[in-house]
Amino acid sequence: MPANLSETTFINLFLDNTPILDVRAPIEFSHGSLPNSTNLPLLTDTEREAVGTKFKSSGQIAAITLAEQLLDPTEKAKRLSAWSAYIKTNPQAVLLCFRGGLRSHTVQEWLTKQGYAIPLVEGGFKAVRRFLMDSLEKSASMSDFVIVAGNTGTGKTHLINHLRYSIDLEGIAGHRGSAFGKRLQPQPSQIYFENNLSGQFLKLPVSEANRIFLEDESRGIGSLSIPLCLHNKMSDSPIAIVDEPLESRVNTILNDYIISNYREFESEFDTKSMTHFSEFLFSGLSKIKRRLGGEGYVEIDQLINTALSEQKTSNNIDLHKNWIRKLLSDYYDPMYEYQLSKKLQRVVFRGKKNEFLDWASHIDHKKN
């Protein structure tokens, strides 16, 4: 039987992108999981609840007996088949339950009898979660950040992803960070977001990086929150501002929020794509209705309606530029200028995209 994974080797799970066979119940997995993990549970949610109740009332032996009764030979064979198939496809996989206890040991024993050797993670999900949160605090305290700021539509996320030493917070959060930033796929759970974020920092050679680039974010990205230890450090870090003309920003928004998003809707909904895409735009607009005021909201609403009508009848998306331009100039730009006015003492660079990339390339390298 292969050696199990102790805390001293947890980092390798993320450096090596190790496949993880998570045998916790589905409800546990949905609440929080690890990157590169697949949920093939030993017990369903209902079975887990029944076994847990029996454990509390009658002890471990009675709980094990009940679990064996629930998993009749046919059901046990199905689950063994699923685990075996996973290991065949992922021979480097490790095994995980919540505390590295009875469930993972049981599955490991059953698989060993079938001729499949798989190490388990000592301490289970709980121990790895603690390791990741400790690592994130360490990464935040050890790292020097540059916060990439700029008006909405300057393409900050694209710039971040051009740099070697950077973390794409919005990418990890599955959200573009604005009222219209919701993606078609749901955001991950808060716990998964934090685990994945910590894992991304572990993959960066923090000790080598002169600076790590992060996009300027409020603490909330959609429904998720940046961990406080990280956001506090971001709030004290130097800022690089990217300036781009309004029309350039309008085109960036058009590409990211209209063209790119609509392709996702087409892929998911086919003939119903326009209906769902329209709902997506109006839902985003409703989130800033109060701040736009009555007249402002009605004007943008009408411009979106006109643009969608033109898109539907002629497949022409150009009219979307009208409401994007209006929203940028009347809403997002004034809000940005106000927020920036409180951070000017932290600004260390200001320039256009190409100037920023040139400047950043001189500090995006190994420390001497």
Image: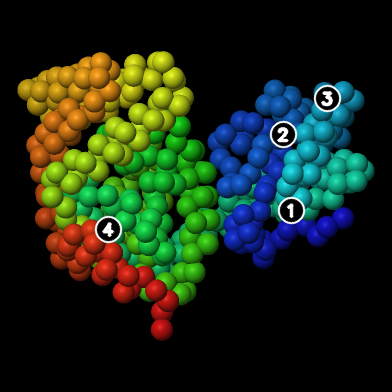
Residue under circle 4?
148
Q: CA distance from mark 1 to mark 3?
A: 26 Å
Return the disc, 1 or 2, that comes first in the chain's sequence: 2
Going by the picture, which residue comes out furthest to the front? 314
Q: Quadrant of the C terminus?
A: bottom left
Return the disc, 4 or 1, that comes first in the chain's sequence: 1
Return the disc, 3 or 4, that comes first in the chain's sequence: 3
Q: In the image, what residue occupies the spot 78% across and 53% down?
A: 119
Q: Which mark is residue 316?
A: none
Compared with 272, 108 (above or below) is below
Q: Amino acid at mark 1?
A: Gln
Assess disc 4: are there few (<14), some (14-19) or many (≥20) residues with their C-alpha within 10 Å of its C-alpha: many
Residue under circle 1?
92
Residue under circle 2?
41
Q: Secondary structure at mark 3?
A: helix
Q: Amino acid at mark 4?
A: Val
Q: Amino acid at mark 3?
A: Glu
Residue under circle 3?
75
Q: In the image, what residue occupies the spot 16% across and 56% down?
A: 243
Q: In the image, what residue occupies the spot 33% across and 73% down?
A: 363
Q: CA distance from mark 2 to mark 3?
A: 12 Å
- Look at the numbered discs 1 and 2 and tell me whether their residues touch, using CB distance below 8 Å: no
Assess disc 3: are there few (<14), some (14-19) or many (≥20) residues with their C-alpha within 10 Å of its C-alpha: few
